[in-house]
Amino acid sequence: MNWRIKGVIILLGVVSGYAQPARADFFAGLKAYGQGDFATARTQWQGTAADDTNKAMAHYRLGLMLVHGTGVDKDPDTGVAWLRRAGEDGLTLAQLDLAELLFTGVDLPVDYPEALKWSQAAAKSDNAWARYYLGRHFDRGLGVPLDYHAALRHFQFAAERGVAPAQRRLGQYLAAGIAVDADQENALHWLALAAEGGDHPAQYDLARRYNLGTGVEKDHKKAQALYRRAAEAGNAKAQHDLAMFEIKGLLGEIDLTEGRFWLQRAAAAGIAQSQFQLGHLELTQLRRPLLMFEAFDWIGRAWRQNHAASQELISKLARELPSRLQGKNPAAKIDRDATAFCLLAYAVSAWTEIDQHCAKMAKIGQVVAQYVMGQVYEYGQGRPFDLVKAQQWYRRAAIAGLPRAQNAYGRMLLRGLGVKRNPTKGAAWVRQAAEQGYAPAQFNLGFMYQEGFGVAAQVVAAANWYRRAAGQGHARAQINLAAHYMTGNGLPYDPIQAYKWLLLATIPQGVDRSEGGVAAQKARRSQGLLAARMTPAQLEQARREAIAFRPE
């Protein structure tokens, strides 16, 4: 370009003024969001002009992005401010989401008075969901005085307009005669409508009625079908009852594998009865030595919830095991009585008795007891931390072939904890545990291949080990495996598989000690990013595959 022309260009810029930035546009933001360009979407929505007819919707979408951390840093305070602006502009969607988020405390602190305010705002247009939300406040006396009659009016209004949770509560009011004459026939009508509409508490309620014959003729087939629908939707109580159908064979053959699967889901969700039943199942009907540590861990969790049957079993074993062990010289590496005697104290955190229960058994070669001694020294349970002693006990159990101990000893070597750091040797021990099918070790080995820690970095090997751990229900492995599918790194790009694994990673599965919390939040954020670029058919396929998942 010659200088004369350049000067003209500069002059034109001075005369006309600097070019104005393009006007922010809601639909441009929506397009960017769908393409995964969240920064552009945020810029477009944040800059929407005051006279734009889509201003409230732009602020609403921006608020949700910030509250949930979808493609941007999570910022609930700023997000809720944008949602409030949209709500104050009369956008019913924003009012409803504010009401729900502030009532449930999902990603925002619970604030019942403000939740009530937004429910009332949305209800001015007779929105059925808003009326249900209002009923929920009066039903439980949250933000308002308890008033069953007011709750009933709101539930009936919403139920007649197809809101499934309102149909369930209306049915329950009619069944129990709350603020209305009891009417079992009408109650079942509304419960059935709610169940058909996908409300899993209604499905569970109706399943129990058919299971026990409460107000209906007993029908185990209908009960099981309803339990299954509720269980697949994540209802932990339904998962427990469905497990009992499978374990007891109430509709035919006993299926311990399927029963254990549902018990573990319910146990991981915190149901004490499920924790006890799962531990008892692993100790009695499954009776695999390598399951003993896990079995007592579940029984111990139930015991800490003051579960009566767990307390009775612990007391019974405490009375009987000493005499059964007297004069006994166990030959097996995992003797049932000797191992149970150790795990009895470990399960209930009886740290002052660990030496009596576990150290003695560890010294005579009981490998689970050796692993437990490694744990108590590593984490300072009832004694000072001693990483040297911890790795020594882990090493003895690892040499004897215990996968948990191999993974733990490998971890100590990798990090130089209580022993000279040796990543190569550590990786070899982790591999031994992984090859025996121990899911945490498989996850660790995948991470090591991903980062080149103790092994040469190999993206395909990382994805394969993540896949093996994910297939057993390990949440962090499922998240990392999804990342490989999302990026096409080490695996073919497959958004359906990625979304499936992310869905599973948010579910309590009882395999990864770090599941839930931060891991589940990370999975949900990744879901939001991915879902923006998927079709409804792809999302539905991923959901179906997640429901059909069973551990390998």
Image: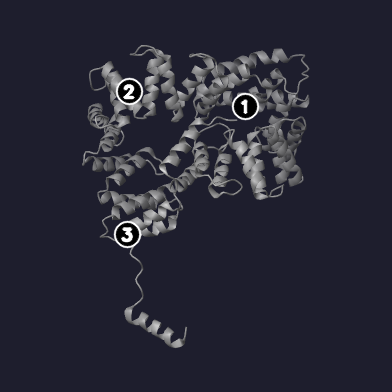
Look at 59% across and 34% down and name the residue there.
471
On the rendered structure, is 75 left or right of 301? left
Image quadrant assignment for residue 369: top right
Q: Residue 105: give x, y in percent of width and height.
A: 39, 40
- Residues at marks 3 and 1 touching, judged by CB atoms closer than 8 Å: no
CA separation in Å, label 2 and label 3: 45 Å
**Circle 1 sits in a helix, a strand or a loop, which is it?**
helix
In the rendered image, which residue does mark 2 sit on? 192
Frontmost of labels 2 and 1 is 2
**Circle 2 sits in a helix, a strand or a loop, which is it?**
helix
- Residues at marks 2 and 1 touching, judged by CB atoms closer than 8 Å: no
CA separation in Å, label 3 and label 1: 55 Å
Q: Earlier in the sequence, mark 2 or mark 1?
A: 2
Does residue 418 appear in the picture of this structure? Answer: no
- Residues at marks 2 and 3 touching, judged by CB atoms closer than 8 Å: no
Q: Residue 392: give x, y in percent of width and height.
A: 76, 36
CA separation in Å, label 2 and label 1: 39 Å
Taking 464 as reference, is 339 above or below it? Answer: above
- Hey, what amino acid is under mark 1? Glu
The residue closer to the viewer here, 93 or 466, is 466
Residue 48, numbered circle: 3
